[in-house]
Amino acid sequence: MPLEGSARIVQRLTSCGFNVEREAVTLIAGSADPSRTVDRLVEELDDDVLVIATADVRAILETGLETEAEAASPTRSDAALATDTDDPTDREARPTGATPDGGDVRAEPSPSADGHDDPSISTGTTPPDGDSSAASPPETEGVREPSSDRSSSDEDRSTSAPDFERSGETDARSVEIEGDMTGQSTGTGAYRDFVTVFRDRLERLGSKLRGRVNHRPASSIESMPGGSDVAMVGLVNDVRSTASGHWLVELEDTTGTFPFLVMKDRDFAGLVDELLCDEVLAMEGTLADDSGIAFVDSIHFPDVPRTHEPSTADRHVQAALISDVHVGSEEFMAGAWNRFAEWLHSEAAQHVEYLCIAGDMVEGVGIYPDQDEELDIVDIYDQYEAFNEHLKRVPGDLEIVMIPGNHDAVRLAEPQPGFDEELRSIMSAHDARISSNPSVVDLEGVSILMYHGVSLDEVIAELPAESASYDEPHKAMYQLLKKRHVAPQFGGHTRLAPEERDYLVIEDVPDIFHTGHVHKLGFGKYHDVLAINSGCWQAQTDFQKSVNIDPDAGFAPIVDLDTLDVTVQKFR
């Protein structure tokens, strides 16, 4: 089979240990004999070359040795080269723990979201092998990869090289990253840094509320006569219940604080259970006779406007949204990852042109008690080397975007800058784009807010189960969209770093909100914003058993960027 497809070219070169620039792939594909060109690159490049550059390809093509005669009778047949690409695991250095296994790749219906603005779900029902009866309801509890996932031989798996071009519209691809604070950190931990970041939060989120209420600063409200109508925009400074079962909410702005009383019989009293300290909101009410407190008539959140209309791509193109790979853990599901990579090389994935990874590429070191007993790779740099090898398995013609998570080798406090230069040089496969956590990634006009999701633990712990739970992580994400901040509560379990600018504010409404961290699969729509928590690629660890975490592992949500419909592919 001729080697004219970009995916086939990349797969052949990565199987020989090379990364390759996109323009270089285009040059190879356009040469008289792509198979011969690849052979000569492999044979003639120095052993220390890691990335095949465009100049390397031009040098080969300009030698004049690739004649019409050579093109007519190459040294190796196209059929032989196609055979070489049948098994991408046939390489000199296989990644640690990457022993493949067999098994069908099945397109599974996604777990149903709650009734809140449910998205239109496009679910595949026929697996690549054509077994139309293979589709079954998703299983998202008790996920654990069988032991053969880490120990079966290469002979157990057969991978067919793709015989298609992934996209005839590569010129239409567009990736733009906004809000990357890598290299922009200014915080020193001084008191003034905290004042600055909270002032910035109040100003930016307050501006979304002041047009909806007749805002007065706290110092002005104190001097108003009893019975006056008042409204204030501020940070939630304190929430406590009274002896009568009412709620007292203290708001703070730059001039001071003022208490608002929410009566327990008001129809919005339940909203108080969803409040977090340090979030920004507005309250309207009436001053008591002594002007010392205001009785609340309404509560307003920055929220996503009901009029929000999401943007979509102008063509049928898809993005795979995943997170929490955790290479280096004994429970990393190498077999599931290999099947995912193989599926991306298949015609079933021909419209998948983007891969977004929302943190925790590796298991890390010293993240939780006795973690060393569950590590397959104990050195953090070796973990990233192994992750890079696994990343090489996915097609090189994908556009890849990655942000760090709390297991990655970056600072724990959010916002997290992107990986340093040393780690970037290790994770060089396919020239992935790396940004900070969080970041906004624009794919062909569709904005994706990527946030690893550490604050979800705190939201789930603080809020009622019907508002946020691990079983439905997208509901916790709804709360963050409502508050327009990915980690509003300061001083809790989520480590936050004060900066001159609050990079955790959701300034503009995204079209897609993508998180991970909690290792649970869930998605739904909130005011037409698609919220997806993408599960993980790690089976249940002993530590997770001890804290009752039952992961949803080996799933890959696939989003149609032209419709924002979701298909969940299962690879476990």
Image (spheres, rainbow, N blue to C red):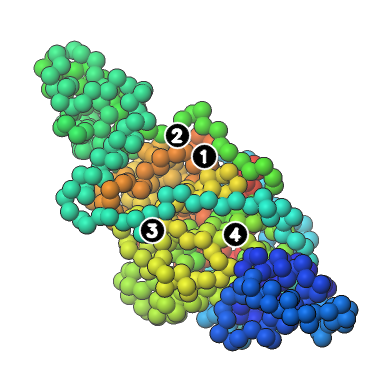
Q: Are marks 2 and 1 in contact (CB under 8 Å)?
A: yes
**Image coordinates for residue 145, horizontal then vertical, percent:** 55, 70
On screen, residue 138 versus residue 67, left or right, reads: left
Q: Are marks 1 and 3 in contact (CB under 8 Å)?
A: no
The three-letter code of the residue at mark 4 reads Glu
Residue at numbered disc 2 = 304
The three-letter code of the residue at mark 1 reads Val
The three-letter code of the residue at mark 2 reads Val
Q: Are marks 4 and 1 in contact (CB under 8 Å)?
A: no
User: Residue drawn at (74%, 76%), measured in percent from left and top?
Assistant: 61
For the residues carrying marks 2 and 3, which lies nearer the camera in this image? 3
On screen, residue 352 versus residue 33, left or right, reads: left
Residue at numbered disc 4 = 399
> Eyeballing the image, is 459 above or below 381?
above
Q: Are marks 2 and 3 in contact (CB under 8 Å)?
A: no
Crowd band around label 1 with a 10 angstrom C-alpha radius: few (<14), some (14–19), many (20+): many
Kindly report the distance in space between the C-alpha atoms of the residues bearing marks 4 and 1: 23 Å
Instruction: Label 4: state its secondary structure.
Output: strand
First in sequence, mark 3 or 4: give its number. 3
Of 558 and 174, nearer the camera is 174
Residue at numbered disc 1 = 529
Instruction: Label 2: state its secondary structure.
Output: loop
The three-letter code of the residue at mark 3 reads Thr
Q: Which mark is residue 117?
A: none
Q: Which mark is residue 182?
A: 3
Task: Locate the N terminus and report the quarter of the image it occupies.
Answer: bottom right
User: Residue drawn at (64%, 84%), measured in percent from left and top?
Assistant: 45
Kindly report the distance in space between the C-alpha atoms of the residues bearing marks 3 and 4: 20 Å
User: Residue drawn at (31%, 56%), measured in percent from left and top?
Assistant: 185
**Image coordinates for residue 547, horizontal then vertical, percent:** 36, 62
Kindly report the distance in space between the C-alpha atoms of the residues bearing marks 2 and 4: 29 Å
Q: Is residue 18 visible?
A: yes
